[in-house]
Image (spheres, rainbow, N blue to C red):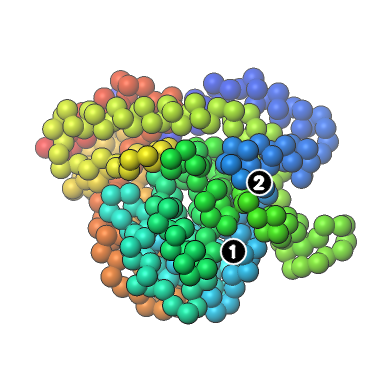
Amino acid sequence: MSTIPLLDLNAQYRSIKPEIDAAIRRVMDSGQFVLGPQVQALEEEIARYCGTRFAVAVASGTDALELALRGCKIGPNDEVLTSAFSFFASVEAILAVGAQPVFIDIDPATYNLDVALLQKHLSKRTKAILPVHLYGHPADMKSLMEFAASYRLKVIEDCAQAMGAAINGKRVGSFGDAGCLSFYPTKNLGCYGDGGMVVTHDASLAKEVFLLRAHGSRKRYRHLAIGRNSRLDELQAAILRVKLKRLDQWNKARRLRAALYTSLLQKNGLGQVRAPAERKNYHHVYHLYTIRTPNRRKVIDRLEKQGIATQVAYPSTLPSQPALKTKIRSQKGFVEAEKASRSVLSLPLYPELSAKQIEFVVQSLRRALL
């Protein structure tokens, strides 16, 4: 029986093993392991890649969100508009700075927050918007930035799943006041542990995040703010520098495999399965290839019996999370987010996935739906 994982990080490592091992050895030989030359070089390379003036490395994507919010002076009594359908870190960061999340339902095609609904949820306390570029497809940043400018709102982009995604050639993370990256191992650009980064055009914001990530200190034992320990280590930075050179190539491979999936779904007459959408002039990087399918539980079970891994991202909306019951005011009416939570299913997708494996997944999916 074939075994097809959702993601094969071992295959990726084998393809770049000599370079990765050499990069790790260089760090080990240097004796410097935290916030050294590898981190500084990575920050410069990421800023160039994203098209921003600055990049500040931190310990995780979640920290990137929280520190970006703090750097934008978002805090208690402020409201932040964000998607009702995302990973928990998006709302967790908002709550961590003392602000209140206000959830927005999603566009059913792209799964990103529906910009047309922002006006409905605007209040005098609204200070920022936190869009999530879910699954690798950019949110509607043109309309969102126009809305934000009209009301002088800060925009913090959650780019955790969308490194390299773009609209008309402009990469995500470069639209708003800040873009937040995650280097969690499963991401399109992932390290071998946790890691994150804040990218921005704003020198004062970059300076603030730089301060906050190291206990509020620029000079040893002199602390100018209450910060935190959120430092990216040299080993992870060295690994990421090797991988960054291949990111566009890997994203291209993801796009080709996503196109094959979509073509095969159509050829196999799987009209009841909705393939991912991609807006015109939007560059989707397919962090996940997420379909909508009827009878999801049956499909998951039958694919699992064929050795095919799947993932449900996400099985519930953010407003329905138990941890938020006493943290947010009651909000309802997330019709599209709730529909998505009941029907989305991510299929295996990674640069090393073969055409034969994709054909096997689609054939197995067709049989599962008979």
Picture residue at 63% right of the left edge, 42% below the top: 47
Residue 362 can be seen in this image: no
Q: Position of residue 9 (x, y in %)?
A: 50, 31
Within the image, what quadrant is residue 98 found in? Answer: bottom right
What residue does disc 1 label?
Answer: 69
Please state which amino acid type lies under the numbered disc 1.
Answer: Leu
Q: Mark 2: which amino acid? A: Arg
On the rendered image, what quadrant is the C terminus found in? top left
Instruction: Please report whichever mark, 2 or 1, sits nearer to the chain's N-terminal start.
Output: 2
Secondary structure at badge 2 equals: loop
Who's the residue at 26% across and 36% down the image? 303
Compared across the picture, whether 121 is left or right of 367 comes to right
**Image: 98 above or below 267:** below
Tags 2 and 1 touching, CB below 8 Å: no
- Horizontal side, residue 236 vs residue 152: left or right: right
Q: Secondary structure at mark 1?
A: helix
Q: Residues within 10 Å of mark 1 (few under 14, many from 20)?
A: many
Q: Position of residue 318 (x, y in %)?
A: 39, 64
Residue wearing tag 2? 53
Residue 123 visible, this angle: yes
Q: Nearer the viewer, residue 164 or 212?
A: 164
Q: Nearer the viewer, residue 338 or 366?
A: 338
Q: Is residue 328 above or below residue 34?
A: below
